[in-house]
Image: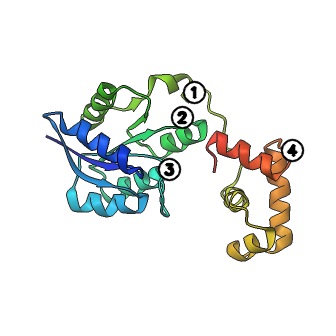
Amino acid sequence: MIRVLLAEDQYVVRGALAALLGLEEDLEVVAAVESGDAVVPAALLHRPDVAVLDIDMPGALDGLAAAGELRLRLPACRTLILTAYGKPGHLRRALGARVDGFLLKTAPPEELVAAIRAVADGERVLDPSLAVTAWDLADNPLTPREADVLRLVAEGTDAAEIAGRLFLSAGTVRNYITAIVAKLNARNRVDAVRIAREAGWI
């Protein structure tokens, strides 16, 4: 029996996935959580063989960060990312986090079930539609600090507040924003946010 943990913030999707997997004789959903922060505590409690994780979830940890924590805290648990978005940046982060599988939610149900079994058996799984993308991933040009600044810009935070939250001067924040816009060949900060989001860098 393959023990599965589900992490998905949308209640209906989470319930549908649990019901779908429950139809399989060799799969058992032992936990279903709605936030990235709940993944590791649930995994430590229920000891799943495979964690199926969405990327975008509420909380301090998204699915990819939760996968990284799982690798440290419960290395026996394999990780399969199941997401609506095949953004190059997300795929690069997933490969960097050494997840065991990356599948789009548009995949047929039988493909998801097969992916869980394959990951449980120690195989790596990549959605076929992303195979070409995996060969041609653009490097994220942003430093971690620049990404932090741009995430706050994306939230509508002004330079003074960003400076306070990141313990920087307002002038340094403005310099970061100028550098970010230049690196991304963006027209302005709004365009920089759009470019970075589409690439999965923030």
The 10 Å Cα crowd at callout 4, few under 14, some 14 to 19, many 20 or more, is few
Q: Nearer the viewer, residue 49 or 161?
A: 161
Question: Mark 3 or 2 closer to N-term?
Answer: 3
The residue beneath circle 3 is 56
The residue beneath circle 1 is 133
- The secondary structure type at the circle numbered 2 is loop
* Residue 52 is at least partly visible in this image: no
- Nearer to us of marks 3 and 1 is 3
Q: Residue at x 55, y 22 (%)?
A: 132
Per the model, the C-alpha gap separating discs 2 and 1 is 9 Å
Q: Residue at x 86, y 70 (%)?
A: 171
Q: Amino acid at mark 4?
A: Arg
Numbered marks: total: 4
Asked if labels 1 and 2 touch by Cβ distance under 8 angstroms, the answer is yes
Q: Nearer the viewer, residue 197 or 167?
A: 197
* Colouring scheme applied when the structure was drawn: rainbow
- The secondary structure type at the circle numbered 4 is loop
- The secondary structure type at the circle numbered 1 is helix
Question: Mark 1 or 4 closer to N-term?
Answer: 1
The residue beneath circle 4 is 187
Which quarter shows the N terminus? Answer: top left
Q: Amino acid at mark 1?
A: Thr
- Nearer to us of marks 2 and 1 is 2
Q: Amino acid at mark 3?
A: Asp
* Residue 131 is at least partly visible in this image: yes
